[in-house]
């Protein structure tokens, strides 16, 4: 069994190291999908159309980094932030780009940012300002920067790894606890309760007197177990009836007396033991020293 624990622990440690290592190799450029570059050019084209320019060209997309791209134009144009936001959002929603990104519009002359906004996967965290204003005719470049897919994938895989390890540890602990309970139960089966000169094996429903073994019914065994747990103390009659017949629904008053009578006969080999009837109250197992 120890080998199983060692093997499970080894798998846990291996999972902790392999999953982050795997995630670190999942880095993927947002432009890897050919459709994405076309969508970026489409964004540029629609921006020109919105400014009533149907002749100027969108120059080739510039890849600044794995997740940052620049859209440039042949000629000057004017735009409204509202229109730019809608154009970008509509196109990105149809792409395989990450759904979290920032957009900035810079002047060609000094690269000063004249407008920008941020779209989050959670729309309540979007940052959009200065809508309703028209930006004047000028030379602009539009830069889109997307959230790193590596971070997104790493977060998802990390959460999965934590969940997986937690579940595995939970079942491992349950297995260990169940094993311990079983061992305790087995030990209890083998443990005897000394009642005078008798040895009482509750789980086995058995009494032993010297070398003689005396069988008990389950109810006799349960009744003796309750009485022997509090020797020389009165156990209320109703308590005994409830403990022994609680799962049967019907309690026959004289059944208790009958089982007491049977127990007395099985314990009569030791004169120091007596089950005493306390009239109107209950019974007690009296053991004389």
Image (cartoon, grey):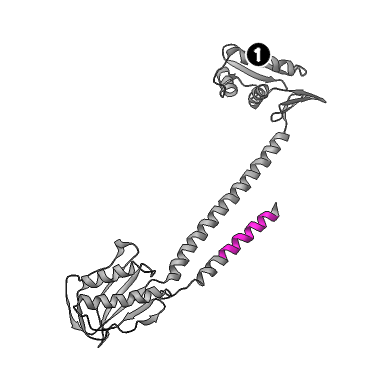
Residue 21 on the magenta segment: no
Residue at the outermost right position: 211
From the top left corner, tell me how far across and down residue 248 is, in percent.
57, 22
Query: Is 245 drawn above or below residue 21 in the view shown?
Result: above
* Res 267 seen here: no
Query: Is 111 drawn above or below residue 217 in the view shown?
Result: below
- At a point 24% along the width and 76% down the height, the residue shown is 47
Secondary structure, magenta segment, majority class: helix
Query: Is 51 drawn above or below residue 3 in the view shown?
Result: below
- Is 55 left, or right, of 65 in this rendering? left
Query: Is 186 drawn above or below residue 8 in the view shown?
Result: above
Compare residues 122 and 95 and report the one nearer the observer. 95
* Res 82 seen here: yes
From the top left corner, tell me how far across and down residue 227 is, in percent.
64, 23
- Is 198 left, or right, of 139 in this rendering? right
Identify the image quadrant of residue 43. Answer: bottom left
Residue at the outermost bottom position: 109
Question: Around disc 1, counting alpha carbons within 10 Å, would you say few (fewer than 14), some (14 to 19), or many (20 or more)?
Answer: few
- Is 24 left, or right, of 96 in this rendering? right
- Which image quadrant: the C terminus? top right
Identify the image quadrant of residue 152. Answer: bottom left
Please state the extent of the stretch shown in magenta in the rendering.
3-16
From the top left corner, tell me how far across and down residue 76 is, in percent.
21, 85
User: Residue tagged by mark 1?
Assistant: 258
Residue 5 on the magenta segment: yes
């Amino acid at each position: 069994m120890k080998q199983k624990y060692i093997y499970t622990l080894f798998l846990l440690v291996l999972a902790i190291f392999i999953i982050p290592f795997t995630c670190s190799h999942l880095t993927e450029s947002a432009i890897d999908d050919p459709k994405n570059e076309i969508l970026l050019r489409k964004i540029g084209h629609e921006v020109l159309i919105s400014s009533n320019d149907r002749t100027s060209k969108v120059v080739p997309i510039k890849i600044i980094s794995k997740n940052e791209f620049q859209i440039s134009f042949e000629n000057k144009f004017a735009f409204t932030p509202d229109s730019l936001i809608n154009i970008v959002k509509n196109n990105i929603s149809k792409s395989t780009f990450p759904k979290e990104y920032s957009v900035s519009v810079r002047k060609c002359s000094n690269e000063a940012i004249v407008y920008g906004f941020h779209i989050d996967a959670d729309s309540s965290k979007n940052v959009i300002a200065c809508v309703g204003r028209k930006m004047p005719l000028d030379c602009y470049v539009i830069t889109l920067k997307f959230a790193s897919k590596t971070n997104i994938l790493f977060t998802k895989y990390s959460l999965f790894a934590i969940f997986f390890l937690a579940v595995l540890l939970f079942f491992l602990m349950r297995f260990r606890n169940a094993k311990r309970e079983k061992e305790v139960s087995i030990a209890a089966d083998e443990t005897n309760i000394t009642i005078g000169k008798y040895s009482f094996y509750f789980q086995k429903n058995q009494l032993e007197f010297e070398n003689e073994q005396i069988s008990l019914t389950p109810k006799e065994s349960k009744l003796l177990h309750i009485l022997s747990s509090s020797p020389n103390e009165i156990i209320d009659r109703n308590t005994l009836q409830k403990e022994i017949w609680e799962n049967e629904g019907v309690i026959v008053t004289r059944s208790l007396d009958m089982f007491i009578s049977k127990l007395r006969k099985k314990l009569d080999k030791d004169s120091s033991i007596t089950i005493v009837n306390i009239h109107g109250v209950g019974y007690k197992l009296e053991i004389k020293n």
